[in-house]
């Protein structure tokens, strides 16, 4: 495909990609050569460092962003008979975590300009059974948290911040804006452990509950028992094995040192895209409110119609440019249609948007030339 000398051959460009260096590899190898492969000292080190990086009181490490969401729903003591509001335009895990605890996700629509959960839709959907809202900081832009709190006074918020480490809302850091905030360490996200997740909270008691939850609901781990010379433990609640290994924590710790510069780099890349599309007819980036600092997990463009989106998608993929659609509204997935009876028309704004949006490549290793190439390929479709 990428034969040397082949005329016009260019390297395929993924939509997202991790950045790893020698220091990351060394950090992992050091742990592999140590005594603790899991439930060792790197777990607490990652938790303390990430809490400090965010400016949160506590952080808990788990083995995926999905496990982080599950732990958050568990910590809020949500179960059968309870409802949790979830925006329709998100990754399925934002809603699946509610089902894991036997509760019911209730889908709410998004704002047409930002594609963030619409506070009016939240107010309309709240019932006496509503126990929480999952606020997804879509693409890396924080939700309007003040408006959400005003729309649903007293309703606990799980901030699904998997797209948004490093983002700010009115000067306040993502990771401190919800009762609990969840992050993912998947390679396509801002920093990685291969797989992994983190939850931040201002409530240390919730933190302790989630630490037990990731370890079968057992209230002390093997290392603590070994350090204390004790054998006794009790299972207090139904937990899972959601533990993150020490070598993964070491990788995340090493990556964390570079996270701020990567967030800055993502903003620079978004600025290049913004400038290209600012005066281009038929294609535009999503609206960014002026009270936020965006973290740009995704750079999402919107075009005039579903047929233009299909043409654009095919053209870019044909050019070796990795583009994706984020997301199929969760309530339109066959599983949700079948089990919850959801169907088109439930969240019309999300449904209309998902046929007109496309996520362009966005990762710190991109060059200005890469952005030019993607933008030119877009304009060659949308300007005709
Ligand atoms: C990535 C992601 C998740 C799940 O994270 P995993 O680490 O892949 O389990 C949840 N919510 C959103 C919005 C995500 O983008």
Image (cartoon, rainbow, N blue to C red):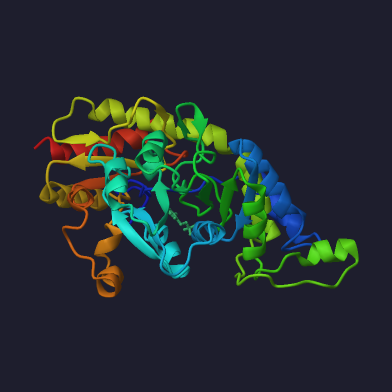
Residue at 18%, 52% (x, y): give it: 348
Q: Quadrant of ligand 1?
A: bottom left
In the picture, measured across the screen, residue 113 lies left or right of residue 143, that is: left
Q: Position of residue 218 (x, y in %)?
A: 70, 69
Residue at 32%, 42% (x, y): give it: 116
- Viewer can see residue 5: yes
Q: Position of residue 286 (x, y in %)?
A: 27, 36
In the picture, measured across the screen, residue 350 lies left or right of residue 59, that is: left
Residue at 27%, 62% (x, y): give it: 331
Q: Residue furthest left?
A: 384
For the residue pair 172 and 373, the one nearer the viewer reads as 172
For the residue pair 84 and 5, the one nearer the viewer reads as 84
Quadrant in the picture for the C terminus: top left
User: In which quarter of the view is residue 33 placed?
Assistant: bottom right
Residue at 37%, 56% (x, y): give it: 128
- Viewer can see residue 35: no
Q: Position of residue 94 (x, y in %)?
A: 41, 57
Up the image or down, 67 lies above or below 108; here it is below
Q: Position of residue 117 (x, y in %)?
A: 32, 45
Q: Residue furthest front?
A: 128
User: In which quarter of the view is residue 368 placed?
Assistant: top left
Q: How many marks?
A: 0
Quadrant in the picture for the N terminus: bottom left
In the picture, measured across the screen, residue 361 lies left or right of residue 285, that is: right
Q: Residue furthest right?
A: 229
In the picture, measured across the screen, residue 293 lies left or right of residue 176, that is: left
């Amino acid at each position: 495909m990428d034969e040397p000398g082949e005329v016009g051959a260019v390297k395929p460009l993924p939509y997202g990609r991790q950045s790893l260096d020698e220091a990351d590899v060394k950090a992992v190898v050091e742990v592999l050569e140590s005594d603790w492969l899991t439930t060792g000292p790197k777990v607490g080190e990652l938790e303390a460092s990430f809490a400090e990086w965010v400016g949160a009181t506590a952080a808990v490490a788990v083995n995926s962003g999905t496990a982080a969401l599950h732990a958050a729903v568990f910590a809020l003591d949500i179960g059968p008979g309870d409802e949790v509001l979830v925006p329709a335009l998100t990754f399925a895990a934002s809603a699946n975590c509610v089902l894991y605890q036997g509760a019911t996700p209730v889908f709410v629509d998004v704002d047409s300009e930002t594609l963030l959960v619409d506070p009016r839709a939240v107010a309309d959907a709240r019932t006496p059974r509503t126990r929480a809202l999952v606020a997804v900081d879509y693409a890396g832009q924080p939700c309007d948290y003040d408006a959400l709190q005003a729309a649903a006074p007293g309703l606990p918020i799980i901030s699904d911040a998997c797209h948004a480490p490093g983002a700010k809302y009115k000067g306040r850091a993502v990771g401190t804006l919800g009762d609990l905030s969840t992050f993912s360490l998947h390679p396509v996200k801002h920093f990685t452990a291969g797989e992994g997740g983190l939850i931040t909270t201002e409530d240390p008691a919730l933190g302790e509950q989630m630490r037990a939850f990731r370890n079968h609901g057992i209230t002390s781990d093997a290392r603590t028992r070994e350090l204390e010379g004790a054998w006794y433990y009790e299972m207090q609640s139904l937990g899972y094995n959601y533990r993150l290994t020490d070598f993964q924590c070491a990788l995340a710790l090493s990556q964390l040192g570079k996270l701020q510069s990567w967030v800055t780099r993502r903003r620079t890349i978004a600025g290049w895209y913004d400038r290209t599309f600012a005066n281009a007819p038929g294609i535009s980036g999503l609206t960014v409110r002026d009270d936020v600092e965006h973290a740009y997990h995704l750079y999402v463009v919107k075009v005039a119609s579903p047929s233009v989106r299909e043409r654009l998608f095919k053209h870019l993929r044909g050019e070796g440019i990795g583009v994706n659609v984020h997301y199929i509204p969760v309530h339109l997935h066959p599983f949700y249609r079948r089990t919850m009876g959801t169907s088109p028309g439930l969240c019309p704004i999300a449904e209309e948007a998902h046929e007109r949006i496309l996520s362009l490549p966005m990762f710190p290793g991109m060059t200005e030339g890469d952005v030019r190439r993607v933008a030119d390929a877009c304009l060659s479709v949308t300007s005709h």
